[in-house]
Image (tube, helix red, strand yellow):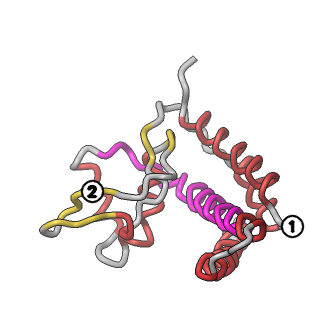
Amino acid sequence: PKLTVRDCLMRQIEGCEAFYRRHRLQASPTIAAGLAWLRANVPQADEAPSIVHGDAGLNNMLMHEGKISVMVDWELVHPGDAGEDVSYTHDWVYRIMPFEEFLDYYHRCGGPRYHVEREKFYRMLADVRVGLYTVRIRDMLRKSDHPEIALMYGAQHYYGYFIQNIAKNLLAT
């Protein structure tokens, strides 16, 4: 059987759940609820997976003469739905152009169909995944003999930010 986008999403959720069990300092009802919501709302996505960057924001694009020349920061790359990256860019894109105009350009350049109905799922997935990344940093710092103060601040600050985003997404359902 061929691997589908849905299979990839289920694997991501399972990986997030295992990661959370290994690295959490304390139980977080918000993260647990976010993971449960993701599991209950996996899109029916039977198409073949694409390569997903996983952090496709303007902060990870290098520009040359007004055009994107390269994407950097590939540690979150995984197979899945290209729409996950498109969804992730939404908050960056609207600052420089209407999102619908961006989507038109994306499709004219050969981008696959964007499933707008999956956007909420991908936003929750991104918030949970990055929230878990901050959990990992907090765990590493706790175990370190020489924790770096910048990482400590960033992990604590962004943990709260992503917990709030997950909670907002849950309340909006």
Q: Which amino acid does label 2 sit on?
A: Val
Q: Residue 57, relative to residue 96: is it above or below?
A: above
Near mark 1 (Cα within 10 A), the count class, few <14, some 14-19 or many ≥20, is few
Residue 22 vs residue 64: left or right?
right
Task: Report the residue at 37% width, 64% height from top.
Answer: 60
Q: Residue 160 — which label?
A: none
- Name the main secondary structure of what is drawn in magenta: helix
Q: Position of residue 53 (x, y in %)?
A: 44, 51
Task: Report the residue at 68% width, 61% height from top.
Answer: 132
Residue pointed to by mark 2: 70
Residue 114 is a magenta residue = yes
Q: Where is residue 170 in the image (x, y as percent from the top left)?
A: 72, 67
Q: Quadrant of the C terminus?
A: bottom right
- What segment carries the magenta color? 111-138
User: Residue lying farthest left?
Assistant: 65
Q: Where is residue 146 in the image (x, y as percent from the top left)?
A: 69, 74
